[in-house]
Image (tube, rainbow, N blue to C red):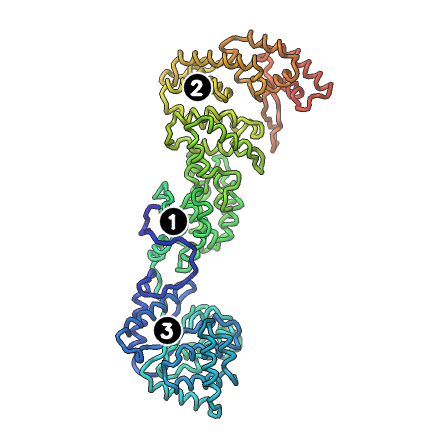
Amino acid sequence: MSDVDGLYTSTSGSLTADRPRTKLDEDELGYRDFAEAVAAGLAGRAGNDGLVIAIHGKWGSGKTTAVNMAVDALERREAGKGEDERTIVVRFNPWWFSEQKDLTRAFFTELTASIGKRLSAGVRDGLRTMAKKVTGAGELVSSILAWTPAGPAAKQIAELVKAAGEEIADERSLDDVRSDLAKALEKEARSIVVIIDDVDRLPGDEARQIFRLVKSVADLPRVTYLLVFDRDIATRTLERPADADSPEWLEKIIQASFDLPPVAQADLNRLFLKRLNAIVGNAPVPDIVRWGNTFHGAVVPWLRTARDVGRLANALAMAWPAVRKEVDVADFVAIETMRLFEPRLYAFVRNHGHDLTGTEPNDSSREAREEFGAVLLANVEPERRKRAERALRYLFPRLDAIFANTWHGGDWRNAERERRITSKRRFLVYFSLGLGDGIISTAEMAALRASFTDPKATRRLVQGYVDQPRRAGGTRAAVLLDALMAEVDAELEGGDEAAARALLAAADLFLNAADGDRSPEGLPKIWAVSFAIDPLLNRLDAKTIATLLSDAIDGPSPRVATFFVTIMSGEHGRVGKEEAKPKAERRLSLTMVKRLEQRLAERVARDAQSGALIQQRDAASQIWAWERHAGAEPIKLWIEANLDTVGFAPWLMMTFTGEGTAHGFGDMVGKRIHTVSRESLETFVDVDRLAAIAEQRITNGVDQDKAAKHFLDGLQARF
């Protein structure tokens, strides 16, 4: 993936936990100066009085990272001091302890265990005795066993504290115990910093207990409490009617407070892009400008904290492997951003692909467009609707017709080729984390291209897709044909000639009964096949085209070969009433065309005599090509000789019966109709005799395929 806005390579793209950083050198959010300032304050504060400091920051803003870095900075400052002079850092995270009645006991347990033997026996004994007094516990060991973090030292610590606690008399008052502890602390050369993090995650009662606890022990000398929490959340947590412990008493507990410095948006962007680059690697970015627009318009507005960055990066790391070769990077990052931060909008988009993909029809009413736009944005909170509108327009240009009264043209194949979310065929891949049977994967397309060196291999491969039925009906061959049409302009390693030869050999397989006669866009299926092959022919010289079509006439796809020969004949005005194209637009010379026509007529005549022709489900175009070159007489003789042969008459009826739809005024659904051109058919068949055979089949009850009924309906149809 190309670098954009400071994008650079990371060494790991794996899923990561929301893990705070611990060292100054790991700073990615611009907190180093803040951390060093906090460390300087802790190391150089005047006097020995107890102190309570608060660090405020929003959830996910990196408060713990900043505190960890402050501890690292403090350790670096004191690196030159002796062990007995360095600050002791005690960490207590009340969120780890679930029951509020044990929080105070857990706090003293952690404090005592962290200090260990680094301070005097007077301090250790004072802390244990105070713990027993404050908690009302006759024995501290049960608390230690329950709440000391797991590890091999847990039992030893518990036993030491129990033994020491049993030797301490409890006759003194709490004030006396506190006074003795204070005197012991004043004699120490070392200070204690107690970090209490994640207070804002606690339920209200537990948060009050922590603040009361700090208040009760806040004035111990040489002890600094560093409370880390979101001020707004803590204030709301402490608010309740008739409560003396209202948020105002926090001001009496905390002597100094600092707000975490805001993270520059550029730093958040850089952090995210670092993670993203490690996840997607060298995924192609077809349009670097569109990537930049999508990133800044549909991703950045929702990245407000380091936690936002981590959540989105983790979501991408989880989802990317399943779709990495099947989606556009910019679109996928944007839609995952929507999924995480605007789930209601995401759900609406997922269920309205038909209204968002492709291009907006110019005949849609302005009222209908505006109504849809209003319903779409109603899924976003009002203050975020403008940014959501901009993001949606980057993803789905069709929405410009709603929000900017602007229409975009363009070929649907571009969106499919670039695997954009705005492609109707590709849309669901972004929401299912899998391709299903309606998408041809990059690997499958690569296998098809690799087969072009051997036309027989290409035909075998396409046959495999014909043999794969889809859940929604039809076969995967139709899906493959769509993919071929979308990527026909792609550069092919084996060259256009090899690709054209291979596809001409396999082409008739796409014209199977299961997939019907029309593409999803309503095109005749043989036109869709031609759209996948014709651009290849256009890039070849006349001699090569003539050779390819000549070989195709004798190959396994005579129906498609007939179609292309007819196209070339039409360019010279040799088909029906079609006018000849200007000489510069004719791909073959007249001599070449006549040779192809003769060769095609000979092929059709051979297939007619061998019986191969009637094995084809639609041979009308071949019969007409035969008639254009050889005249009607040989066809008339062939039909006359076979009309009474079992199966021949029904096949002939189906071959020359067309199908279409008609709409009456106010109809929502078209009516299926059948057509037969009696005038054309009479050129080489007795239509009345064929009609009589059709009536007899119906009378005899042998018209299960309805060939006779449709033929007769077509004869009676009026246009």
Amino acid type, residue under disc 2 in the picture = Leu
Does residue 382 lie above or below 33 as drawn?
A: above
Label 1 crowd bin: few (<14), some (14–19), many (20+), radius 10 Å: many
Does residue 633 lie above or below 706 as drawn?
A: above
**Residue 117: image tag:** none
Q: CA distance from mark 3 to mark 2?
A: 83 Å
Q: Are marks 1 and 3 in contact (CB under 8 Å)?
A: no
Label 3 crowd bin: few (<14), some (14–19), many (20+), radius 10 Å: some
Q: Residue furthest left?
A: 80
Label 2 crowd bin: few (<14), some (14–19), many (20+), radius 10 Å: many
Residue 192 locus on image (x, y percent):
36, 79
**Residue 295: image tag:** 1
Q: Earlier in the sequence, mark 1 or mark 3?
A: 3
**Residue 549: image tag:** 2
Residue 60 locus on image (x, y percent):
42, 62
**Residue 257: image tag:** 3
Residue 369 appearing in the image: no
Q: Element at badge 1?
A: helix
Q: Earlier in the sequence, mark 2 or mark 1?
A: 1
The reply, left or right, for residue 420 in relation to residue 5 is right
Q: Element at badge 3?
A: strand
Front one among 591 and 12: 12
Q: Earlier in the sequence, mark 3 or mark 2?
A: 3
